[in-house]
Image (cartoon, rainbow, N blue to C red):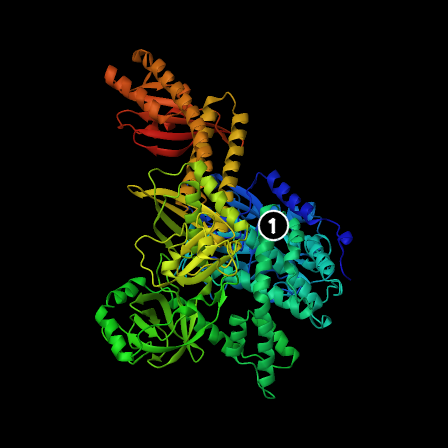
Amino acid sequence: MYITSDKIRVPSKVVKSQFINYFESKNHTHWPGSSVVPNNDPSLLFVNAGMNQFKQIIMGQIDKDSGMSKLTRACNSQRCIRAGGKHNDLDDVGKDSYHHTFFEMLGNWSFGDYLKEDAIDFAWDLLVNIYNLDPTRLYATYFGGDPEHKGLPPDLESRDKWLKYLPENKVLPFGCKDNFWEMADTGPCGPCTEIHYDHVGDRDAANLVNADSPEVVELWNLVFMEYNREGNGSLKKLPKKCVDTGMGFERLVSVINGFTSNYDCDMFTTIHNEIQNLLPNIPPYAGKFGTDDKLLIDTTYRVISDHIRCITIAISDGIEPNNEGRGYVLRRILRRAIVYGKLYFNANEPWLYKLIPTVAETLEISGYKVDKVVTVVKDEEVLFSSTLDKGVEKFNKICNSLKSGDIISGKEAFLLYSSFGFPLDLTQIMANERNIGVDMVGFDRALLEHQRASEAINSSHDNVNNLIDTLSADVIHQIEQYTGIFTTDDSLKYEWSSAEGVGDSFDCKVIAIWDGKQFPQLVNPTSTDGIYGIVLDRTPFYSESGGQVSDIGQFTLNGSVCFNVLKAHKMGSYVIHVGHVLGKIGVGDVIKSCVSYELRCGSAKNHTSTHMLNYAIRRILSDNVDQKGSLVDPEKLRFDYNTSKPLEMEQIVTLQNFLNEMISSSLPVSTYVLKLENAMKINGIRAVFGESYPQNVRLLAIGLSGDLPEIEQLDGTKISLELCGGTHVSNTSEIRAIYVTCEEGISKGIRRITCITGKVAMEAMVRMENYFYQYQNILKQITTFSNTYDGNLYEQSIASTLNRDSLVALKGSIEKDRYLPLIDRKKLYTEIDNQLKLQWDTLKKYQKYLMGVVKLVTKEDPSIFPIEQGYHVIRSDDLHGDIKHMMIVAQSFTKKSKINVLILSKLPNVDDAGKNVDKFVCITADGCYKANEFIRDKFNDTDVTFDHAHIGSATGQIAYN
């Protein structure tokens, strides 16, 4: 029976708050979960576990100035994505009751504090006494050793602890596969103990534990981090043992409410209800699986409700669908949802984006982020729509061409996957409906070949430039004589869709190959590991000019990649495609030229934005401002111009607002071809200084569409009109956003503005907001310290030092971030600097107090102080154990009275977990006497431990029982 929201006993929000409240009551700090984008961790595509953000603490590599370095106990709910890398659940989602691409993980951590015994006690107490789970349904597993890893001892401590709560037949040993946890191929790891729950109960279900049974599910994993997996596969002991636990939030909610499926929980039923509201012709969700779900209606509900949650979180955290890394995985997830919706819900028009507001509400996302997600998802749906229709046609054509008993080949399955966005599991399902198989081995082979081709793109660009340096006028003359063809037709570079970020591949003929010394007729991967230059009769590749970097891409021959284009270089009338040979290619071959249109899209956004900036800066400053240079690539734009002084911050704000108004106005961007002499008659026309133009030029107009008006009617002071041969967007709305990141002088009278646009700009703003969030958290700590330690100068100085260190660390992180919105960065810098001044004022006040104590102590006659071990012992607790000022006192007496002194000072208010502890600092000016021995002799009836001890100074703790 379908579970409606009124059947839910305990809402998910209550379950989460109970978890956090419980561990806060056990002295854990509620440390907020991180973004799903890993922070400087190349081993991960996405955050896939709660411990990811604590990895540096566990490995003993945390910056001591980080606020996180003070943590000993922590808890939170971390949003995770498992759809790439080591932990990848994508292909299982929808088929069962518990797999997800996105989920939340509840966790508690100990960093060198409590270990196995307390971790197990906490887990049992929470599950049985707070969540009221039936203890007879619980099973525990532990690491029982592994014959393939004989160096790892069994975890008998965990076993013995569990036997205090559970009978022996419910405490089960397993090997590394199930009970030795590893986050990724490298990184922290260790033995774990898991808690499993039997949905049925009143039986012995030990044989179903770790058997992938939907009846007995893993509920909580307690990992005891003891090792780090090195790059060579070896294990290295961590500096200190840590506890890292993780419990799937969705699964916990389902267990507490008595459900056997996570998809019956309120975070999914809300989405299921909205799906039916949007698509009233489909039946409601009925919770069917496998053969009971013959029409795959419920499978599609599960796929879409899971995927749309993942998509919403990922985009709101700054990830956008594209063809690389995590963006590529996100696009796969989104397209998988689109395909399922079209095939099994008959949803032919874009509709998933309409789910976003409901999903965002369940995930507590609000504001502009929701609008951003809606826009991105809708754009992707529109973009993929025509491709999907063609993919279905291609699939039908493949199947219709097969003879009885044939299967879909690996190459054909990969074609559907790579060119039409068909998830492999969906191809298998659709083929199975026709009783047709799929060649999985062949698919894996085609995928591997594709990956190898992609990796080759990252080859050294130094070799590219070395080959270009060999392209002399004599080489160009030889090409003319050798081929009889005097130019490469590159007009195809304008035949693409900037709105969709796609374009066709074109048949082009190889007319010459240059290896830096000669013209070989045929080359293949074994000929040399070097770089080649290939000349075609025509090309869609844009060669570097006008400040815009060249396209990159590939050539294919007979369906296989044969050449990776790393740079397109214009030499004379030819375009030389420079790159790596990956397959046999020869003169006369007709290859397909495939441009990386996604990267060109970034360049196009930045190039059009450069024109907008050129126009805007003249509107704001003066018509006398001229462009003096530019650089446009997929990541950023740089614009150089002449001026006598830098822009004021108010002018930068005005400039940025003006540019974003042009974007939000959705201005058309049009190109027209006309004679140079006519173009130069246009009032206010802009042309780049030092650029040579052909007789027929392209005029780029922003804000103009349709036929070109008469020359006399055009006015470059009212709209952007500029001569340009680059590639551009078709409408300013495609740019989405633009932010100034830097304004600087590069030479006398020349200033430079750097901007980011599109996806790079959106991601930068997400990072900027995260920095503001971190700053607000520090402010909260400052307020707490101020209220707690009001009037206590010593405690205030400690708090100010911690706050100042946190602020300095945050400012350092911002300074290292290459591209952030300049306006927001300056605003945050100002706020941080103001706070630093306030904290420094507190520290100066404390230093002034300590110097006052120094003056009082040094006025005393040294003869009044007792002599012990040949030293005049001076005790001043008012110095609060401050070594610097204690040394000033010691040196003053040594210099003034020619006597040896030993300074002893007690630190105020030292508390060590409720114990009665005094902490002393002891120093000698001459450095000859062991100060730690003096403390031992002085307090010989007490237990003395030393934080720091060497000749001349010591810090000791004296604990009284």
Front position in the image: 371 or 241: 371
Identify which residue is drawn at 57% across, 44% down: 75
Q: Position of residue 721 (x, y in %)?
A: 43, 53
Residue 151: name its quadrant: bottom left
Callout 1: 10 Å neighbours few (<14), some, many (20+)?
many
Front position in the image: 256 or 522: 522
Above or below 562: residue 299: above
Identify which residue is drawn at 61% across, 88% down: 404
Residue 442 appears in the figure: yes
Identify which residue is drawn at 59% across, 58% down: 377
Q: Position of residue 274 (x, y in %)?
A: 71, 56
Secondary structure at numbered mark 1: helix
For the N terminus, the quadrant is bottom right
Which residue is disc 1 drawn over? 370
Residue 958: name its quadrant: top left
Residue 870 appears in the figure: no
The amino acid marked with disc number 1 is: Val
Give the residue furthest to the bottom: 404
